[in-house]
Image (spheres, rainbow, N blue to C red):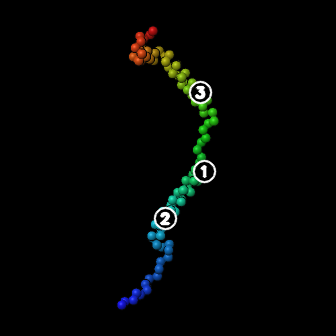
Amino acid sequence: MKTLEPSKTQPRAWWREPMMWLVVGGPAAVILAGVATIVLAVSRPDPVVDPDYYRRGLEINKTMAERQAAASEAPAVRPALEVRNHAATGGTPGR
């Protein structure tokens, strides 16, 4: 029967094993990405919505309605609106 002889090579240090870096590298990369995400989230917060957003929205709607009213009174647009309204309602234009 043959006896096993001890290996003549010295064992390598743990940091020189490629499999160790594969096992430790994945979770380490995830932890670093998580820390980077937290740093970005804390240092650059989302802007706060304006407290009076509803009033500003009403003002925007009012100015848009005024612009549409002014555009509908323009002579160049008036005939197109009359024909469109006539086609939609079946009424006679200009009455």
Q: Which residue is mark 2?
A: 25
Q: Secondary structure at mark 1?
A: helix
**Quarter location, residue 93:** top left
Side of 37 relative to 7 (left or right) = right
Residue drawn at x 47%, y 70% as measured from the top left: 20
Q: Give the Cα distance between marks 3 and 2.
A: 56 Å
* Circle 2: element type: helix
Q: Which residue is pictured at 49% across the width and 66% down the height?
A: 24
Q: Quadrant of the C terminus?
A: top left
Seen as rendered, the residue at the extreme right is 51
| Dot 3 or dot 1, earlier in sequence | 1
| Residue type at tag 2 | Gly
- In x, y percent, where is residue 34? 54, 56
Residue pictured at 41% horizontal, 10% vertical: 92
Where on the picture, by quarter, is residue 50?
A: top right
Residue under label 1: 42
Label 1 crowding class (10 Å Cα cut-off): few <14, some 14-19, many 20+?
A: few
- Residue 52 place in picture, x, y as percent: 63, 33
